[in-house]
Each structure stands twice: as C-alpha cells, then as structure tokens.
C-alpha cells in the first residue's frame, strides 16, 4: 500500500466562513472525510495538520523549509512514498517552486488547494484533494519534483502560475501547458519536461529580504533607492520583454554593482529577451549593467530562487551560475 504524507496548512479549501469576526477553518480530517471516492484509492494517508491553519499569504519560508525537511526524513526512512501539501492558492506558485528547489528525491511532492471555499456552490476542494492524492500515488509522476494539481490538471512547479483570482481553473502553465491531466479519476502523464531541474542546498535559513519592483509607465527612479535601502537583493518585474524607463537604467545598474538584481517581466508569460533591443533601459542595456537574466521565471519564482540561492551562497559568480542554470532550457552537457 502506498503511504502518502499529507500536510494541511490552511487556505480557502478549509475556509468555512466566519464567526464573531474570526475565520472558521476545517482541519485535515474533516476535509478528507468530505472527499467521495478517497476510500477506493489504495493509499494510506499520514495526516500532518498545522497547529494553526493560516491564509497562504501568512505562510513563511521557515515553515515550508521545515515541511520539506520533515517530508525528506519520512521518505528517507521509508515511511512515506509521496507527499501532498494542501494550502491556500495565493502563494501556492511560490511554495511549489520553493519545494521543487529543495527536493532532490524521486518521490512526488504534490501541492493543491481550492479556488472556491466549502460554503460555496461548486466548491472545488474535494475534487482537487482526490486528484492530488491520485497523482501522488501514481509512479508515473515520480522524478518530476514538485507538482501542482488543481482542476484535474497536473502542472510542473517550474512552469505553473496562478492565472485567475477566483475561477476554479485558477492555475495554468502558459508557456508549456499542463504536464498531465486526471480523467475519470485516472492520472495521465502527457509529457516530461525538457528542461532540467535545479536543486538548492541551503546552508542557513532563507531570510534574505528581496522585494519585487513592478515597473509601470513613467516609474519614478526614486523607488529604486527606497527599495535598495531595505533589500539584500531585488527582482525587477520589468515591462514587456525586460524593459524599464530610461531614468531607471542607471540606478538599477549601480544597484546591481552592490546587490544581486534580477531582471524578470511583469507580463505573466514568456521569457525575457536577451539580445533584441538596444536603448537605455532595454534588456541588453540592463543585462550589460549586470542584472541577472531570469528567462521564463516570472517575478514570483525569481524572488523565491534568489532568496533560496542567497541561503546557499552570496558569491556573485555562484548566484549568476544558479540563475543561468534555473533559467536555461537545456540539460547541462
Ligand atoms: N485564497 C486564500 C489563501 O491563499 C484564502 C485566504 C484565507 O484562507 O483566509 O489562503
């Protein structure tokens, strides 16, 4: 029998309304009891419930790295064959990518949640839980790192993004499509990712302060200095393929001499460019000034990667190598 360690952290899936101004949250056992068909899967569930379930906006790097360590011990000891993490969807993209970066084992780590809470008609939590457990139990989904399962789709943590604020189909992989699907309760792996997976081995806690500067039309260059004052690193969610207004180019270049500054795009899909445009504030200008290329990683994942990478080494050459590996599409030779 396959044993799945299932961690309940909180979020919409267990949000049962409010009483006296306080959220009422269902625990893991109550949520599992409401999943039709779960008893027909040949799995044993080892339920690990957070002492206090929280909205996913209040999860921390410390909590998630401890979860990864706990799951690693269970898999190493042979007491778990797969891991499921149930949390709110607001930060699920980031948690999934962090766990992917921390997970170098073959067992699947499957994240799920819900877009519609249990008080609403058409709550999607039970279907997502069932699909997530089915995928975790399926050997076809081993060696793929962390996966996100919602709306009967299986996404790679490396590519998935939250793409809608409210609809059940709130997650997508705009650049690749899903890795797999769940049909009539049966998981199907559609393709394996061509890009290699990067794993990190932090030597200390993930505590670096990395704000994201989302650049807008006519952005004031003073914001660069304001953020730099509180930052260990910066992610620039730039316009289009990686562009900023001319007045920001010099301050960002100067900052990149002091701190790691990552160039990403605010668009939501596609890679940033590397060699198309030449003008102050263009991608060639910013990369030439020392900003780090993030390829297809969006700003949220670039921030997670930088925080994780800074917990491994602050050496600038190593940071650049880490970003080059994470954003590369090709298996290393
Ligand atoms: N979607 C929210 C989350 O990501 C729900 C907030 C809540 O549970 O209070 O957790």
Image: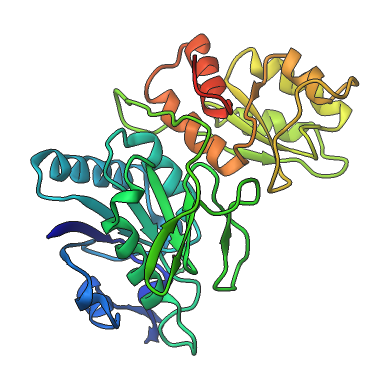
Query: Residue 320's quadrant in the figure?
Result: top right
Residue at left 52%, top 28%?
326
Q: Position of residue 75 (x, y in %)?
A: 16, 43
Q: 69 or 213, which lies in front?
A: 69
Q: 147 or 99, which lies in front?
A: 147
Measured along the vertical axis of the image, is residue 45 above or below residue 34?
above
Going by the image, does 76 lie left or right of 86?
left
Going by the image, does 316 lie left or right of 186?
right
Residue at left 86%, top 32%?
245
- Dividing the image into four quarters, tell me where ligand 1 lies: bottom left
Measured along the vertical axis of the image, is residue 34 above or below residue 300?
below
Q: 9 or 329, which lies in front?
A: 329
Residue at left 62%, top 59%?
163
Q: Position of residue 26 (x, y in %)?
A: 29, 78
Q: Position of residue 152 (x, y in %)?
A: 47, 67
For this orientation, the residue located farthest to the right is: 279
Measured along the vertical axis of the image, is residue 201 above or below residue 183?
above
Q: 99 or 260, which lies in front?
A: 99
Q: How is the image coloured?
A: rainbow
Q: Position of residue 85 (x, y in %)?
A: 32, 57
Measured along the vertical axis of the image, is residue 119 above or below residue 229?
below
Quadrant containing the N terminus in the rendered view? bottom left
Residue at left 26%, top 65%?
52
């Amino acid at each position: 029998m396959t044993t799945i360690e299932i961690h309940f952290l909180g979020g919409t899936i267990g949000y049962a309304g409010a009483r006296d101004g306080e959220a009422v949250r269902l625990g893991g056992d109550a949520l599992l009891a409401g999943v039709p068909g779960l008893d027909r899967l040949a799995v044993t569930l080892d339920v690990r419930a957070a002492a206090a379930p929280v909205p996913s906006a209040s999860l921390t790097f410390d909590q998630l790295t401890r979860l990864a360590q706990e799951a690693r011990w269970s898999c190493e000891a042979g007491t778990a064959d797969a891991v499921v993490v149930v949390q709110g969807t607001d930060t699920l993209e980031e948690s999934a990518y962090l766990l992917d970066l921390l997970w170098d084992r073959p067992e699947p780590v499957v994240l799920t949640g819900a877009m519609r809470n249990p008080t609403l008609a058409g709550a999607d939590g039970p279907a997502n839980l069932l699909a997530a457990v089915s995928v975790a139990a399926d050997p076809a989904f081993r060696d793929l790192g962390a996966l996100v399962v919602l709306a009967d789709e299986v996404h790679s943590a490396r590519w998935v993004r939250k793409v809608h604020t409210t609809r059940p189909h709130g997650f997508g992989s705009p650049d690749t499509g899903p890795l797999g699907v769940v049909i009539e309760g049966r998981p199907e792996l559609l393709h394996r990712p061509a890009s290699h997976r990067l794993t990190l081995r932090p030597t200390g806690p993930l505590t670096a302060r990395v704000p994201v500067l989302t650049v807008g039309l006519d952005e004031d260059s003073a914001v660069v200095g304001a953020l730099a004052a509180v930052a260990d690193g910066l992610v620039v969610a730039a316009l289009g393929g990686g562009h900023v207004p001319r007045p920001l180019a010099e301050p960002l270049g100067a900052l990149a001499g002091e701190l790691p500054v990552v160039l990403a795009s605010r668009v939501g899909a596609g890679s940033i460019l590397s060699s198309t445009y030449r003008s102050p504030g263009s991608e060639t200008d910013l990369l030439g000034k020392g900003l780090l290329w993030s390829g297809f990683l969006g700003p949220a994942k670039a921030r997670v990667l930088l925080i994780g990478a800074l917990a491994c080494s602050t050496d600038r050459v190593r940071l650049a190598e880490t970003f080059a590996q994470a954003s590369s599409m090709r298996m290393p030779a």
